[in-house]
Amino acid sequence: RDNCRFPWGHPDGLAEPTVPFHGVIYPDGHPWDVEEVKAMMGEEKFNKLGLFEVTYYEGEFAKELKKSVTPFIEFNLGDEPGTGSPDASAGIPKDNFSIRWTGNFIAPESGEFTFSLRGDGRSSMEIGGKELLAAEPAKLEKGKSYPVTVEYVHEKGDAKLRVVWSVKGKVNEVMRAGQR
């Protein structure tokens, strides 16, 4: 599990940076708000970051509750009291919520990429405007930026999703966002 449930300075937590990082969270475990990150960094610097914009919804994309950012798509919230919600302070329940990530993926090399979505709920992915089916490769060119949309629907229990890619000899690399 990543370090998103311990306050800064807690002996069980990792050392925390002073700028957003994976999970992009406050010391109390809640995700940074997009506008707060822009205000902290400045819009020009923010736009140069490789980040996915994350939108949290109540139910299955029914009611938008919060926008945040993250450099990659990998989380495991568990289901213990106080840990199952991505952000209870924003009204996101621990069960029956959905998340949409949008951003770009820059292919590190040319080839046929296979993307895998590993999680507990229903999930889907579009890259370059094309929905990917299970184990279907996507032919990508090195250095080219491809728009990405990942959707995840969580009903009950542990909330988790990990998006990985494989190409040639590289296996199961966590998908990181490219510059906006």
Image (tube, helix red, strand yellow):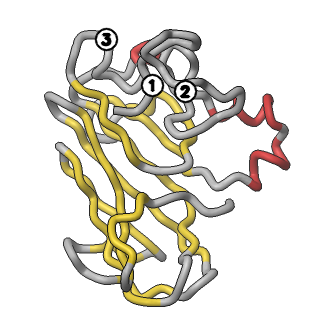
Q: Amino acid at mark 2?
A: Ile
**Could you tell me if residue 36 is visible in this image?**
no
* In the foreground, 92 or 10: 10
Q: CA distance from mark 3 to mark 1?
A: 12 Å
Numbered tag placed on residue 25 in the rendering: 2
**Label 1 element class:** loop
Residue beneath disc 1: 4
Task: Give whichever of discs 3 and 2 has the lower sequence position.
Answer: 2
**Label 2 element class:** loop
Q: Amino acid at mark 1?
A: Cys
Residue located 61% across and 29% down the image: 33
In this rendering, the answer to whether 113 lies above or below 173 is below
Q: Quadrant of the C terminus?
A: bottom right
Q: Quadrant of residue 27?
A: top right
What x and y, as percent, mark residue 138? 37, 83
Q: Tell whether label 1 touches label 2 (CB within 8 Å).
A: yes
In this rendering, the answer to whether 73 lies above or below 140 is above
* In the foreground, 113 or 102: 113
